[in-house]
Amino acid sequence: MYFEFTEEQALWHKTVQDFVDKEFGREYYRQCDQERRYPYELYKRLAELGWIGIMLPEEYGGMGSDAIMYTILNEGLGKYGVDTGTPVALTTFTATNVVRYGTEEQKQNYLPKVCKGEIRFSISITEPDAGSDAASLKISAEQDGDDFVINGQKVFSTAAHAENNIICLAARTDKTAPKHKGISLILVPNNTPGLELRRLNTLARRATGTNEIFFTDVRVPRSNLLGELNHGWEYLSGHLEIERLAVAGMNLGNAQTALNDALDYAKDRVQFGKPIAQFQVIKHMLADMALEVDAVRLIVYRAAWMVSQGKPCAREASMAKLFASETLFKTATNGMQILGGYAQMPEYDMERYFREGKQAMVGGGTSQIQRSVIARGLGL
Ligand SMILES: Cc1cc2nc3c(=O)[nH]c(=O)nc-3n(C[C@H](O)[C@H](O)[C@H](O)COP(=O)(O)OP(=O)(O)OC[C@H]3O[C@@H](n4cnc5c(N)ncnc54)[C@H](O)[C@@H]3O)c2cc1C
């Protein structure tokens, strides 16, 4: 058993970390959040480097890398905030649906453009009445000749408003089938007539942004169907595994920075004649934070390794997502305490990690739902 990256993985880890620090840095992440600005510059640069195609096959312009290399990228992109790293992860994990279920024509049509940054993807599953119980979604896509006609509403569709974005829409295509059986995935460009997006004023994810979307007689060709009709729910299970791994990687990166920032602050901040890091209570808080972030690292890379080996790992991906998101929130919460009053100021970043940690425990399936998945793995 090895607990170290290979030489190639270690080099990639350093390359990504250096890239984030040298070309963007924490100020960029902070500004995007403060200005509620989608990180187009970061996205464009990653496309130039070819990193958007990290998990996509080389024949379509991708890097053909495995889930461990993907997690290393996500850890780096999440370093100064999960939100700003999200658009790339969202495109990459959604694009894997095209790789797995798309026709050759769809692959040729979408994947090279994804790699070049010419198009991007988002995923719309959640509806006002279908959150954790996502399979109860109602939005309808009815066949009309060679088209689907879509009517209904989605909510919390992250990045759906971004330029040249294609929404991977989970819609009901058979109203008479049991709820898990009548769902399909359909690709809907966000400039299709009849589609209205309203950006939501959320606590976190202020940079990337999340939207409610209203569909009124939105017409897309039947060729935009991904995979087989009414098989969408099984496809989403595979999708959620890779989404949870990606999110967990970004949460790990951000939790590590929350710990580092709190540690640096505690060493510098002098009260009662000594750095606050010398008070045992603060030392122990930092020790617990370090312990938890380390444990997250192990569980996240274990899940990445399982995905890279093609092993079934719904339970392990849920464990990674659950533990990484709760640890980000806990580390940032403790960080808020260690930074005292200054924690509340955006220039110290901790309040942003704290907000993003709160969001991390909801998006991609809440902590309660992850625990249900884990319990299912225990036969409960
Ligand atoms: C910023 C943001 C971005 C998002 N981005 C996307 C996106 O891009 N695409 C997308 O499709 N969705 C997205 N979501 C939606 C997200 O996946 C849902 O919010 C989440 O699945 C929970 O659904 P809900 O908010 O309706 O809460 P509900 O399902 O109503 O849950 C409310 C509470 O009840 C608990 N609960 C519900 N059912 C159970 C149960 N069976 N057992 C125990 N507890 C339960 C939940 O854990 C939660 O604590 C995003 C959400 C946010 C906040």
Image (cartoon, rainbow, N blue to C red):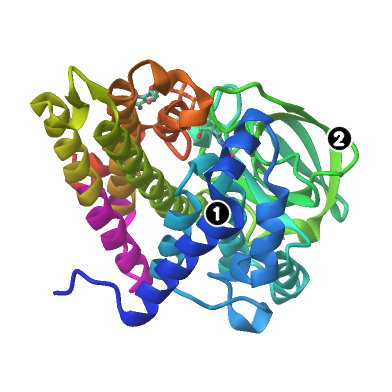
Mark-to-mark CA distance, 1 and 2: 30 Å
Report if residue 238 is visible in the image. no
Is ligand 1 closer than 8 angstroms to the Cβ of mark 1?
A: no
Dot 1 or dot 2, earlier in sequence? 1
- Give the extent of the magenta segment: 295-315
Q: Does the magenta-highlighted stretch encompass residue 314?
A: yes
Give the x, y percent position of residue 370. 32, 38
Which element carries disc 1, helix, strand or loop? helix
Q: Note whether residue 174 is visible.
A: yes
From the viewer's perspective, tell me whether residue 213 is left or right of residue 290: right
Q: Which residue is the extreme one toward the right?
A: 193
Does residue 50 appear left or right of residue 235 in this picture? right
- Which image quadrant is residue 8 in? bottom left
Q: In which quarter of the image is residue 342?
A: top left
**Above or below: residue 99 compared with residue 183:** below
Verify whether residue 270 appears in magenta. no
Q: Is the magenta stretch mostly helix, strand or loop?
A: helix
Taking the spot 12% from the left edge, 25% from the top edge, the residue there is 281
Disc 2 marks which residue?
Answer: 217
User: Alpha-carbon neighbours of circle 1 within 10 Å: few (<14), some, or many (≥20)?
Assistant: many
Q: Where is residue 40 in the image (x, y as percent from the top left)?
A: 72, 49
Q: Pinpoint residue 371: horizontal percent, then vertical percent.
A: 27, 36
Relative to the observer, which residue lies in front, 288 or 157?
A: 288
User: Which label belongs to residue 89?
Assistant: 1
